[in-house]
Amino acid sequence: MTEPRHPEPQPTLGGNAGMSSQYLEIRDLRVTFDGFTAVDGVNLTLLQGDLRFLIGPNGAGKTTLVDAVTGLVPATGSVTKSGVELLGSKVHKIARQGVGRTFQTASVFEDLTVLQNLDIAAGAGRSALTLLRRRKSVLPQIEEALETTGLSHLRDRKAGILPHGQKQWLEIGMLLVQDADVLLLDEPVAGMSHEEREETGHLLRRIGAERTVVVVEHDMDFMRAFATSVTVLARGKVIADGSVEEIQADPMVQQVYLGTTAAADVLEEA
């Protein structure tokens, strides 16, 4: 992956734009399935420029929270993007508000090229007959997404033959060309090589400086290396929230998230 020509500002704890830019505010969010509460009264404020990692044991409610925000499961409470209520809206309407998400398995059109995938993602307003027609020129936002994701040299390669990591980068690029400024990424480095994880971390820093980015993650080494802030969920509730250092030192995180003293040592290792 190549670095952009002009280095982007870095994400920082607490964000770099405050409430004056795009943000996501979650209040008393609850999701219940057949009497089981999967997300239990979650409150979060997610700001531009704060690369937030959402961690917790299996069954903590991380992916369900993302599903609720993006309209895939019904929920109660409130989810607002810069003051606009999202909860109760259809999935496509939430996406049009600039909220994008990825899944653990990349959702790309494998028989089409990288450029065609990005062109389709950018062409939500185009007719079905013109979606696959080659444009006479490449849209500026597509060129920018290719550069940001490091896929410029692979623009004419079919997505289906890309390595796992590059498919994930392409899916992120597809969100970028749709002007998503709130990105919810579900385990983006699962199954990646060490090199791919490093490249993905740098990509998240690039896109996270000017957007609101939330990463659902199990890889603690990856979290320590790239998170600017961390929220820990357990049994559907937020049990800790703060910097990486604060999370590592939190006794409740060590007890509830890891469960044993030996496991706590793993969280604290550099």
Image (spheres, rainbow, N blue to C red):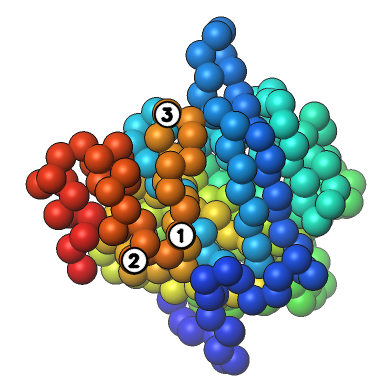
Q: Quadrant of the N terminus?
A: bottom left
Seen from this angle, which residue lies furthest bottom?
Answer: 6
95 and 256: which is toward the camera: 256
**Residue in the image at 53% along x and 50% along y:** 185
**Residue in the image at 61% along x and 71% along y:** 15
Q: Quadrant of the C terminus?
A: bottom left
129 left or right, relative to 42: right
91 and 235: which is toward the camera: 235
Q: Secondary structure at mark 1?
A: strand
Dividing the picture into quarters, in which one does residue 189 lie?
A: bottom left
45 left or right, relative to 190: right
263 and 251: which is toward the camera: 251
The residue wearing badge 3 is 235
26 left or right, relative to 262: right
The residue under label 3 is which amino acid type?
Arg
x then y, percent, for residue 162: 43, 57
Q: CA distance from mark 1 to mark 2?
A: 8 Å
The residue under label 1 is which amino acid type?
Gly
Cβ–Cβ below 8 Å for labels 2 and 3? Answer: no
Badge 3, how many Cα within 10 Å: few under 14, some, many 20+? some
Q: Secondary structure at mark 2?
A: helix
Q: CA distance from mark 1 to mark 3?
A: 19 Å
Seen from this angle, which residue lies furthest top?
Answer: 34
